C-alpha cells in the first residue's frame, strides 16, 4: 500500500503536466502506467485494490491513500497518518519517468522530487518506508523475491538507515549478483538498493539519513508530515474530508533505538554526514551474522 501510494502520487509536477498527483491514476489507467518499468510489481496491488474500491464505491485515489493509512496503522513503530477522502477520479494517466528508480543518479532523483515540490530532506523522510520494504524485480531471481532492505522488515524502525551506512560485503545468496539498481549489502539475505547507498553518503542527503538512523521517533514524525504532503498532491485539502479519527493507533516501536546486528559493529560505518560523526553509543548484538529470510 505504501509503495503504490508513492508511485501514484508522485505523478505530479509544479512546472509541467506530469499527472494529477494522488488521484488513483495508477489504477484508473493501469493499462498505461503499469507498463512503466518503475511500476513493476505494482500490478498485484492494483489487482486486489481495484475490486475493493469498486465494491465499496470509493475513488481509486481514496482507496490508495486511506488504505495506506489503515495498513501502516498495523505496523509497530509507525506514525498515525492523516487520512483525507473525497478525491475525484483521475482524468489522465501520469507519464513515464515520474517515479525515480534505484539506478538513477542522486542528482536526477533530487531534481524529479524537487519538480514535485519536495526537498532533499523530505525525500529522505519518505524513504523511511524502506524500513519495512523488500525487493521485487530488481533481482528477478525467485529466491530473492521479498528479500528485505533491513534486518527488521516487519517494524517501522531506524534499522534500514543504520544498516545502509554499513560497509557492504556481498550480494545476497541465491540471487543473480549485480543487477541494475542493486548494491552489495552487509548482512546475508539483506537487499540494498544502489540509490539508498548513495543517499547515505551524498553530502546533500547524508545528514538527514544519519538523523533517521539515530532517532526512530523523529524518523516516524517526519515521515507522517511528509506523507501528508504527498497524499494531497494535486488535491485541495479544503475540499476533502478529514477522516483521520477512524485510523487506529499503530503499536509502539519494538526498537526505539537502532542497533548493530550480530556480525556488524561501529567500525563498519561509512561516514557520510560531514557535520556530525556517527556516535559510538549504539548497542551491538553479540554473535555471528545469521541469514535474514525473505518476507
Image (cartoon, grey):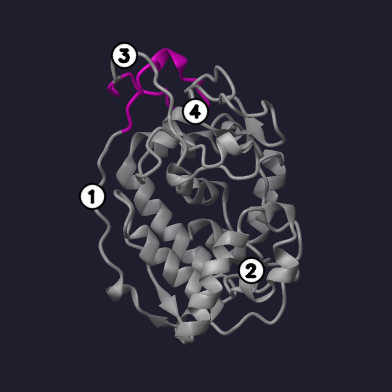
State which quadrant residue 202 falls in. top right
Label 3 environment density (alpha carbons within 10 Å; few <14, some 14–19, many ≥20): few
Assess whether residue 259 is covered by the magenta stretch.
yes
* Residue on which the image places disc 2: 26
* Residue on which the image places disc 4: 189
* Residue on which the image places disc 3: 287
Label 1 environment density (alpha carbons within 10 Å; few <14, some 14–19, many ≥20): some
Assess whether residue 204 is covered by the magenta stretch.
no
Alpha-carbon distance for marks 2 and 3? Answer: 45 Å
User: Which mark is drawn over residue 252?
Assistant: 1
Give the extent of the magenta segment: 258-283
Of 41 and 110, nearer the camera is: 41
Measuring 46% from the left and 16% from the top, which residue is drawn there?
268
Q: Position of residue 27 (x, y in %)?
A: 62, 72
Q: What element carries label 3?
A: loop
Q: What element carries label 2?
A: helix
Q: Please indicate whether residue 165 sits to the left or right of residue 14 in the image.
A: left
Amino acid at each position: 500500500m505504501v509503495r503504490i501510494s508513492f508511485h501514484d502520487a508522485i505523478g505530479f509536477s509544479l512546472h509541467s503536466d506530469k499527472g494529477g498527483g494522488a488521484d488513483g491514476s495508477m489504477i484508473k489507467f493501469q493499462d498505461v502506467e503499469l507498463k512503466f518499468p518503475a511500476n513493476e510489481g505494482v500490478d498485484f496491488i492494483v489487482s486486489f485494490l481495484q475490486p475493493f474500491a469498486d465494491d465499496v464505491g470509493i475513488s481509486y485515489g481514496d482507496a490508495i491513500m486511506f488504505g495506506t493509512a489503515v495498513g501502516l496503522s498495523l505496523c509497530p513503530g509507525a506514525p498515525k497518518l492523516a487520512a483525507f477522502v473525497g478525491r475525484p477520479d483521475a482524468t489522465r494517466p501520469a507519464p513515464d519517468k515520474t517515479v525515480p528508480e534505484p539506478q538513477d543518479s542522486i542528482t536526477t532523483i533530487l531534481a524529479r522530487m524537487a519538480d514535485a515540490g519536495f526537498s532533499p530532506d523530505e525525500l529522505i523522510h519518505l524513504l523511511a518506508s524502506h524500513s519495512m520494504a523488500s525487493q521485487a524485480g530488481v533481482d528477478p531471481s525467485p529466491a530473492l523475491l521479498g528479500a528485505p532492505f533491513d534486518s527488521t522488515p516487519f517494524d517501522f524502525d531506524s534499522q534500514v538507515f543504520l544498516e545502509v551506512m554499513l560497509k557492504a560485503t556481498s550480494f545476497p545468496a541465491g540471487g543473480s549478483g549485480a543487477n541494475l539498481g542493486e548494491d552489495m549489502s552487509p548482512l546475508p539475505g539483506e537487499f540494498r538498493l544502489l540509490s539508498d547507498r548513495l543517499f547515505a553518503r551524498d553530502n546533500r542527503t547524508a545528514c538527514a539519513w544519519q538523523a533517521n538512523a539515530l532517532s526512530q521517533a523523529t524518523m516516524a514524525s517526519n515521515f507522517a508530515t511528509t506523507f501528508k504532503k504527498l497524499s494531497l498532491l494535486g488535491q485541495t485539502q479544503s475540499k476533502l474530508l478529514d477522516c483521520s479519527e477512524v485510523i487506529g493507533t499503530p503499536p509502539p516501536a519494538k526498537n526505539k533505538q537502532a542497533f548493530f546486528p550480530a556480525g556488524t559493529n561501529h567500525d563498519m560505518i561509512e561516514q557520510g554526514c560531514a557535520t556530525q560523526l556517527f556516535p559510538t553509543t549504539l548497542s551491538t548484538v553479540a554473535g555471528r551474522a545469521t541469514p535474514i529470510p525473505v518476507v
